Image (tube, grey):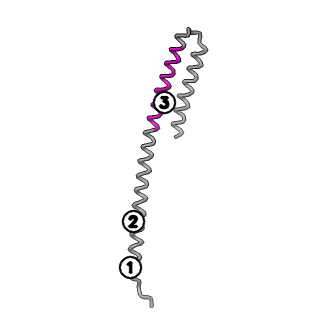
Amino acid sequence: MSKLKVVVGTAFGAVVGFVTGVLIAPKSGKETREDIKHAATSAKEKAVEVAGDATEKGKEMAHDVAGKADEFKARVEQAAEGAKKGFNKKPRNKK
């Protein structure tokens, strides 16, 4: 998850830096608007990419959790079966 935060933070920082640079640079209004539009498009593309990565990571984690749950269920069933067999044994006569 921290890797995702780094990517999001880097993308946000890049966009803020770009927009700041564009606003400070001595360009015409039309050029500045085009630069801002380009920065917004780039930010949107990066956000879509990050969202896709997060979705994929979420699916991987869900798959891992499901696998662990299946393993746990199998162990519990095995333990229950062992306990059941132990209860079904006839008691030995004590002298």
What's the CA distance linking mark 1 and mark 2? Answer: 17 Å
In this rendered view, identify the residue nearer to me: 70 or 92. Answer: 70
Mark number displayed over residue 89: 1
> Magenta: predominant secondary structure element?
helix
Q: Residue at x 48, y 26 (%)?
A: 44
- Residue 37 position, x and y percent, is 50, 18
Q: Which residue is mark 2?
A: 78
Which residue type does callout 1 highlight? Lys
Magenta residues span 33-54
Q: Which residue is mark 3?
A: 47
Q: Residue at x 39, y 69 (%)?
A: 81
In this rendered view, identify the residue nearer to me: 79 or 29. Answer: 29
Image quadrant containing the C terminus: bottom left
SS category of the residue bearing label 1: loop
Q: Is 95 contained in the magenta span?
A: no
- Residue 28 position, x and y percent, is 56, 8
- Residue 66 position, x and y percent, is 42, 51
Which class describes the residues within 10 Å of circle 2: few (<14), some (14-19), or many (20+)? few
Mark toward the start of the polypeptide (3 vs 1): 3
Mark toward the start of the polypeptide (2 vs 3): 3
